[in-house]
Amino acid sequence: MPLKTVATLDVKRLEILSPDGAVDESLMPKVKDELLLKMYRMMRQIRSFDERAILLQRSGRLGTYPMITGQEATQCVPPLALKPSDWAVPTYRGGGVYFARGMQMRYALLYWAGDDRGTHFPDGNRDMMFSIPVGTHLTQVMGLAWAEKLKKKGGVAMTYCGDGTSSKGDLHEALTFAGQFKLPAIYIIENNGWAISVPRSRQAASETLAQKAWGYGVAGIQVDGNDPLAVYKAAADAVARARGGDGPTLIECETYRMSHHTTADDATRYRSDKAVESWRRKDPIVRMKKFLVERKLWSEAKEKALAVETKKWIDEEVAAYESFPPPNPLDMFANNYEHATWPLVEQRAQLEELLKFKGGAKILTELPPAEGRFP
Amino acid sequence: MKTNPPLKKAAAAPAPKTRSLNLVTAVNEALDLALAADERVMILGEDVGRNGGVFRATDGLWKKYGDERVVDTPLAEIGIVGGAIGLAVAGMRPIAEIQFDGFMPAVFDQVVCHLGRIRSRSRGKLSVPMVLRAPHGGLIHAPEHHSESPEAYFCHTPGIKVVIPSTPYDAKGLLLAAVESPDPVVFFEPKLLYRSAVGEVPSGHYTVPIGKARIVQEGNDLTILTWGAMTVTSQKAAKKLAEEDGASIEIVDLRTLSPVDLETVLASIFKTGRCVIAHEAPNSGSWAAELSALIAERAFLKLLSPVMRVGGWDIRMPLFRLEQYYIPDADRVVMAARKALNF
């Protein structure tokens, strides 16, 4: 008997705004000018924030920091298709996602300064901490989406992982469940070309990462991740599908990590500047600016005003970050359980004893008050 | 047919020179010698190839031995460890690297259900001569999940050996012993000591036996049992106790956590009668708990004071601004030692 074709893959790639600013009007999402401007402003602001964070780290005022530069469209735009009551869970390189969700960036700085008070989300939002062991959140987000489906109120859950993380079993299990139970989940693979020093080509041997979706009965699409309009359309379509009960979507956003993995990495050891330069021409911010200027929505005067406003905003966030009092060591014992267990009560007292041993009795009165709830 | 014939050993250099090396360079040198000695040896892990590892432990080896023997894997820890188990069973000698201690829980299924059981389940027909390397511990201002001390989980698992050196000499000798071991070895490398621990290291091949502790300094009043970076902290504490209390402290660096060198441990306790166990992990259910049980079982009547454990608190490792209050410092070791000395 002849072999029959029982399934085929038809993997589409979505591009709307070309690097030179040309638009495919037939694919253009119906969005208000206000939202287009918001996308641009956010990308511009988070780029400047990123640059400042690197300077802070280089001058010893911040710990190891993962750069966002180049990935602003992939990060800032999809959350704009969500409501605050939807779930958003980025990766550790997800400052743009948190920013788009309204997080005060002083907390992002605080987190990367090694301070546990940095995971502070705006009240009312349903955000979750990113996972540092990468991809371990992917099944949890499936669970978040599962709960939203059971609650029948149209809530959805959006999450991210990198091209490297797409190799982990976590994504396989998350998509298996999400597809099986038709969950309102949006999985974005933020394919920035690099897992530290390992290139995308060393991950899956498949042509795209988007096509993984087909293995799970999940909708899949590849998007030019540096095209804010395409990223928005893909995300908004996926959110609409999820809300409408049509199940999950896997979106591969193809973008590029323009900087090192983190400030602790040296990318010159493993990649050439040439590739980086070729991606500079595809910069999402430059592209969006051309588009907005073309549509008479933006001008150099507005650009200058935004630069001034952005600098002021960053100055304020940095000042607020640096004016946090040092953390009280006793705060470590707060929030570990609803009610602290006896070992914690005992060990907290031992830490107090240690602090007295180190600094005499006055050290405890000099410390800022403990903030966390204890016991 | 024996699937896993013993590893070929590098010819000892005619007159090994000793040089002053840091711990990560000693690790690199051991890996280099192992790769050179036997073509079955291979390294696999994330960023171990072109980048030479995030701590540079494999620096230069990809260039020297090529892409088939020093392999940048896809980002998938289960793939790395499960793959290494298969490679080892089929006759290769893989050295798998998990990039950070905090990424090790991902591989528990492979470690707990398979790594230590294959020899026994196959009635001795198959074996898994592989090394699972990972950085260990905190105090380098690393991001979250990059400063963990998960040794107890591994020591609790039968069928594997668990090693953690604290000097460059031991790092090289123990790693070569681990690669030559016919059984799987989990090899922790204290990341605080990668560059800060510097010592004399012979240039050629040598091994430090797995299962033997090292007496760091001899003393009569109290024994500090320790491992990893806490060995250095314990030395600071011992100095303070000698200066301020006139106490004579013996420090035992276990080097191998499983199987523990009970002979050396008990000999020291019999001599001093007092014991502080200093380590970075949370105390409850820790390897320090196992050691104190062993001491209670076998040296009860020789003890002059209860065994004191100094470890991390029973909470998660905080972000780095507070890590110095979580991981015991010399003051905490001193406080515990004084309680034991004045019991």
Image (cartoon, rainbow, N blue to C red):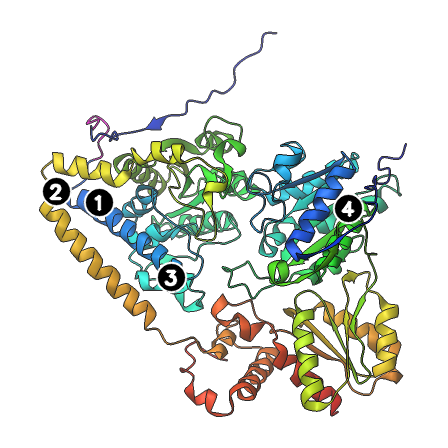
Tag 3: Cα neighbours inside 10 Å, few (<14), some, or many (≥20)? few
| B6 drawn magenta | no
Q: Are marks 4 and 2 in contact (CB under 8 Å)?
A: no
Earlier-in-chain disc, 1 versus 3: 1
Earlier-in-chain disc, 1 versus 2: 1
Q: Secondary structure at mark 4?
A: helix
Q: In the image, which is nearer the foreground, mark 4 or mark 1?
A: 4
Task: Identify the subunit bearing mark 2.
Answer: A
Q: In the image, which is nearer the foreground, mark 1 or mark 3?
A: 3
Q: Quadrant of residue B148?
A: bottom right
Tag 4: Cα neighbours inside 10 Å, few (<14), some, or many (≥20)? many
Marks 1 and 2, how far apart in space? 10 Å
Q: Are marks 3 and 2 in contact (CB under 8 Å)?
A: no
The residue indicated by pointer 2 is A298
Q: In the image, which is nearer the foreground, mark 4 or mark 2?
A: 4
The residue indicated by pointer 1 is A40
Earlier-in-chain disc, 3 versus 2: 3
- Residue A349 placement (x, y as % from top left): 56, 85
Q: Residue at x 68, y 75 (%)?
A: B234
- Name the one closer to the observer, A244 or B110: B110
Magenta-tinted stretch: A23-29
Relative to residue B221, is residue B202 depicted above or below? above
The residue indicated by pointer 4 is B179
Q: Are marks 1 and 2 in contact (CB under 8 Å)?
A: yes
Q: In the image, which is nearer the foreground, mark 3 or mark 2?
A: 3
Pointers 4 and 1 within a single chain: no
Badge 3 amino acid: Ser
